[in-house]
Image: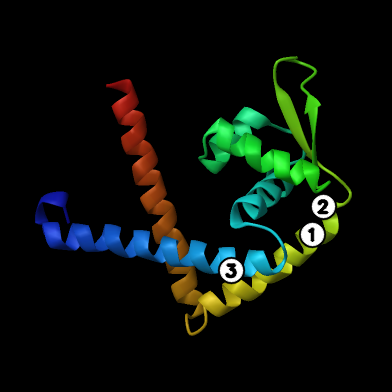
Amino acid sequence: MSLLTISPAAMENYAFEIVETARLIRREANKRAAVLGATKAQWRVLAWLKRTGDGARQIDLAEGLDVEPITLCRMIDRLEEAGLVERRRDEADRRAWRIHLTAAAAPVLAKLEEMGRTFNADMLRGISEAERAALLKLLARLRDNLDQNEQELETA
């Protein structure tokens, strides 16, 4: 099926459903993270550092989280004040900072991970394993299509 055969109403519905679902996920994640004394944004920073490896450059972290560097700077300030991360100069580029998890982050991450497992279980209740796999595959394809479109626009 080509884009020409998809009605404008259907296209709007796809985008609306994805955006609305993401909004509800963010809202619920914020509520659950707040119970642990964290914000969803802080949770994302900690989880990203753990998943991608400790010592990410601050600019790469901002790009990976799709936030402005100044916004990330404030998040890191708060996480640093809480003793969960520390900034260290990048040895290869003295102008850059690398962000490292501290030992104090481990129990916080464990609580956030448990909360994430419960959240995912609640969110996916009633959805079969096959449907879950299909959903992940479709979302990955959407992201790939969007990445390809972005790359084509950049080279044009």
Residue at horizontal 40 percent and vertical 45 percent from the top: 144
4 left or right, relative to 110: left
Residue at horizontal 52 percent and vertical 34 percent from the top: 68
How far apart are labels 1 and 3 at the CA level? 16 Å
Residue 18 location, quadrant: bottom left
Amino acid type shown at disc 3: Lys
Label 2, on which residue?
A: 105
Q: Residues within 10 Å of mark 3 (few under 14, many from 20)?
A: some
Q: What kind of element bears circle 3?
A: helix
62 left or right, relative to 7: right
Residue 122 location, quadrant: bottom right
129 over 135 or under it: above or below: below
116 left or right, relative to 19: right
Q: Which mark is residue 45?
A: none
Amino acid type shown at disc 1: Val
Label 1, on which residue?
A: 108
24 over 8 or under it: above or below: below
Amino acid type shown at disc 2: Ala
Viewer-proximal residue, 108 or 140? 108
Residue 137 lies, in percent from the top left, at 44, 60
How far apart are labels 3 and 2 at the CA level? 20 Å
Label 3, on which residue?
A: 31
3 over 19 or under it: above or below: above
